[in-house]
Amino acid sequence: MTVLVTGAAGFIGFHLSTRLLQRGTPIVGYDNLNPYYDPALKRARVAQLEVTAAQTGTPFTLIEGDLEDCQTVANTFARHEPTKVVNLAAQAGVRYSIENPAAYIQSNLVGFGHILEGCRHHGVEHLVYASSSSVYGGNTNLPFSEHQAVNHPVSLYAASKKANELMAHTYSHLYGLPATGLRFFTVYGPWGRPDMALFLFTRAILAGEPIQIFNQGQMVRDFTYVDDIIESLVRVLDQPATGDPAFDPQNPDPATSWAPHRVFNIGNSNPTPLMDYIAAIEAALGITAQKEFLPMQPGDVPATAADTSALEAWTGFRPNTPVQEGVARFIHWYRQFYGV
């Protein structure tokens, strides 16, 4: 089995590729290593993947390209014939989608269409793709469940992820492509993204700079440690989506379908107030942060919380890493990686 992992130089893609290489699964990575955040971090991840591949004797190939480059995507499928595909490549970030909407349309919509076409024409056994908790948009009924409708996005990023779910479902229906969408909830951990709160806060605190806290600190997030994300992802990858024989088209359940398509939340099921998260960072660093309280950012939501009962029923696993433990592991990695 060969797995094509798009976004292999990204945060989650790096951790997934590492895990698959360690169990002997050949990986074809695909990434454009764009400068949305420091490309040096992405290249450091790739270098680490090459070390893991050499240590395990498992093939690893990296193809540099954009998803919206139709020919490069098509050539990748034709040359490497992946058995399964995990699409993690996307233009990320809720706030950046307000500044640069075109990047999201090209990567998350046009690019994802190219992935679907590659899967269709090359008999891929299972497509797993990254959706996002942001699809719940204006919903306020917590915890968020896959059984809820998600028709009111509040950012273009969220809309692009909802569109991915609709596009994938269409290919599952028309071509029998087993596809599973994963709604990630605020992923954090070692090798994380520099535009995320944990990275931003850690860097600022160590530099003696104030941290920016939006909505006056009245935020709650279902922070999910990356190892829990990867365990869930691998289990889902190994169990292709199937149609739900109990699906009722007269009373359609958004979580399932007659087609081989599923969506699952992946979250810690333990929503944490932002100020408690910051306290965990301060405790791990041994430094009290200077705090600057600001209004809510456009496109953001005050709270997220995941109902992961469907994921647990499907995979037998439930994310469970405590925030204090996960934050401490990130701080340990950060100090080592940056020599702080």
Image: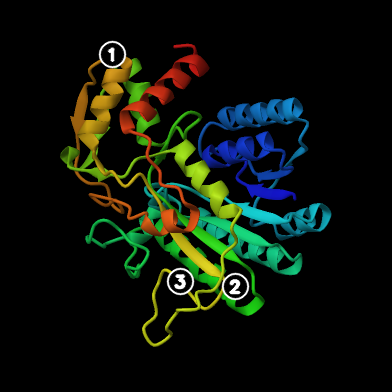
Q: Position of residue 265 (x, y in %)?
A: 41, 55
Which residue in the protein does label 3 denote? 256
Instruction: Say which label, 3 or 1, has the lower sequence index.
Output: 3
Q: CA distance from mark 3 to mark 1?
A: 46 Å
Q: Quadrant of the C terminus?
A: top left
The residue closer to the viewer here, 79 or 66, is 79
Q: Position of residue 217 (x, y in %)?
A: 18, 38
Question: Does residue 218 appear to the left or right of 314 in the view shown?
Answer: left
Q: CA distance from mark 3 to mark 2?
A: 12 Å
Left or right of 246 on screen, residue 297: left
At 28% from the left and 43% from the top, the residue drawn is: 270
Q: Residues within 10 Å of mark 2 (few under 14, many from 20)?
A: many
Q: CA distance from mark 2 to mark 1?
A: 50 Å
Residue 115 shows in this picture: yes
Q: As drawn, is 223 to the left or to the right of 218?
A: right
Q: Which residue is mark 2?
A: 172
Q: Quadrant of residue 187?
A: top left
Residue name at image x 42 percent, y 68 percent: 255
Question: Going by the picture, which residue comes out furthest to the bottom?
Answer: 250
Secondary structure state at the residue bearing disc 3: loop
Q: Earlier in the sequence, mark 2 or mark 1?
A: 2
